[in-house]
Image (tube, rainbow, N blue to C red):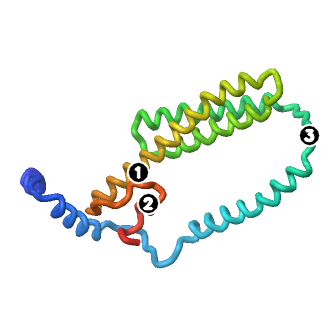
Amino acid sequence: MEAVLRADVEGWSAEERARVARILDDFIERPPLNRPSRLRILVIILTFIGAAVLIPWIVYLSNSLPQTHSVRAWNIVWIGFDAALAVCLGVTGWWVLQRRQLAMFGLIVTATLLLCDAWFDVCLAWNTSGQTAALLSAAVEVPLALVLAGSAVRILARTSRITRQLRGQVGGSDSVWEQRFVMLPPGT
């Protein structure tokens, strides 16, 4: 039966396949959207409040922090940070090798850690004997971070494109800035 169906479908035009895909998409069960979920509302509230609270905090810190610091556990901080970065790089590489959707999260987290590492290395080594090494390290970390983040965006764009095709939606934008959640019904 499957062979007959496959042969039939192969003979259809792109428009006919899209029409059938739209019909089949109506039968996909999705969470009800009659009201926003509490978790979504909580995330929205917390992110906006967090951003709003940080603005005066940054102003306060910029005026109150001392110009020099003495930190006893500095080596623990950097070793711990680099260990976390190594774990993220390894796990992300494994997820990409295994072609897992989770790789998108690993790519973004690892890119973020690389940018933070470059930022702190350069800022903390400025006008010291370690400045050149920090700049050389950043010259590797920043492009690597951009490659990783760009890979996550490409995975998201391809996933969205395939989802639109399976839903029978021809055309549309591949821009991740315009993509809605895949879990939403088409047109919402």
Q: Position of residue 13 (x, y in %)?
A: 13, 59
State the CA–CA distance, disc 1 to disc 2. 8 Å
Name the residue carrying label 3.
67
Please report the residue visible at 74 percent of the width from the left and 31 percent of the height from the top. Answer: 78
- Residue at position x 54%, y 38% in the image: 146
Query: Disc 2 marks which residue?
Result: 179
Vertical order, 102 against 14 (above or below): above
Q: Which numbered disc flags the more N-terminal residue, 3 or 1? A: 3
- In the rendering, at what x and y percent does residue 154 appear? 43, 45
On the rendered structure, is 19 left or right of 90? Answer: left
Of mark 2 and mark 3, the one earlier in the sequence is 3
Compared across the picture, whether 136 is left or right of 152 comes to right
**Element marked by disc 1:** helix
**Image quadrant for the N terminus?**
bottom left
The residue to which callout 1 is attached is 157
Q: Amino acid at mark 2?
A: Gln
Q: Amino acid at mark 1?
A: Ala
Residue drawn where x is 77% and y is 62% of the image: 53
Q: Residues within 10 Å of mark 1 (few under 14, many from 20)?
A: some
Pick the front one: 31 or 135: 135
* Residue 103 in sight: no
Q: Are marks 1 and 2 in contact (CB under 8 Å)?
A: yes
Name the image quarter holding the C terminus.
bottom left
Q: Vertically, is 100 above or below 49? A: above
Please give left or right for residue 179 compared with residue 14 in the image. right
Residue pictured at 42% horizontal, 42% vertical:
100
Crowding at mark 2 (Cα within 10 Å: few <14, some 14-19, many 20+): some
